[in-house]
Image: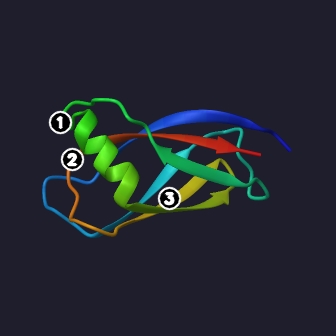
């Protein structure tokens, strides 16, 4: 089973939402891998470091490994979210 790390950009869109699901592609991830994702505290096209810190403190991230990547379900516990964020993930 492969192990490693990666980054992905996720886009909630322009309409604020409390929940969103994403599919992240990574050819090295199989359905039997364990995957964990984290908000990458970094600025992107429309969010700054403060927005990423807020997201890191207030998002619930659930990863489900599938062949060729993982499904990422995000629940915004303290606020609504919109815009683009970077995440970092690890798998084993």
Disc with the residue nearer the chain's start (3 vs 1): 1
Question: Which residue in the structure is indicated by mark 3?
Answer: 72
Q: Nearer the viewer, residue 13 or 57?
A: 57
Vertical placement of residue 64 versus 1, above or below: below
Disc with the residue nearer the chain's start (2 vs 1): 1
Q: Is residue 40 left or right of residue 82?
A: right
Q: Are marks 3 and 2 in contact (CB under 8 Å)?
A: no
Disc with the residue nearer the chain's start (3 vs 2): 3
Q: Is residue 42 left or right of residue 82?
A: right
Give the percent coordinates (x, y) of residue 62.
54, 64
Q: Secondary structure at mark 2?
A: loop
Q: Is residue 13 left or right of residue 35?
A: left
Give the percent coordinates (x, y) of residue 12.
26, 54
Q: Are marks 2 and 1 in contact (CB under 8 Å)?
A: yes
Q: In percent of the image, x 27 and y 67: which residue is there?
A: 78
Q: Secondary structure at mark 1?
A: loop
Furthest residue toward left:
15
Q: Nearer the viewer, residue 12 or 87?
A: 87
Real-space Cα separation, disc 2 to disc 1, in angstroms = 6 Å
Q: In percent of the image, x 35 and y 60: which residue is there?
A: 58
Q: Nearer the viewer, residue 75 or 8?
A: 75
Give the percent coordinates (x, y) of residue 88.
51, 38
Real-space Cα separation, disc 3 to disc 2, in angstroms = 16 Å
Quarter the N terminus occupies: top right
Question: Which residue in the structure is indicated by mark 2?
Answer: 83
Vertical placement of residue 22 versus 44, above or below: below
Real-space Cα separation, disc 3 to disc 1, in angstroms = 21 Å
Q: Secondary structure at mark 3?
A: strand
Q: Is residue 39 left or right of residue 52?
A: right
Q: Which mark is residue 46?
A: 1
């Amino acid at each position: 089973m492969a192990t490693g790390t990666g980054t992905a950009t996720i886009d909630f869109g322009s309409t604020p939402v409390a929940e969103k699901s994403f599919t992240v592609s990574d050819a090295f991830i199989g359905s039997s891998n364990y995957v964990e994702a984290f908000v990458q505290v970094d600025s992107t096209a429309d969010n700054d470091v403060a927005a990423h810190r807020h997201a890191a403190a207030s998002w619930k991230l659930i990863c489900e490994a599938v062949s060729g990547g993982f499904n990422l379900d995000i629940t915004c516990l303290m606020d609504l979210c919109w815009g683009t964020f970077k995440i970092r993930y690890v798998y084993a």
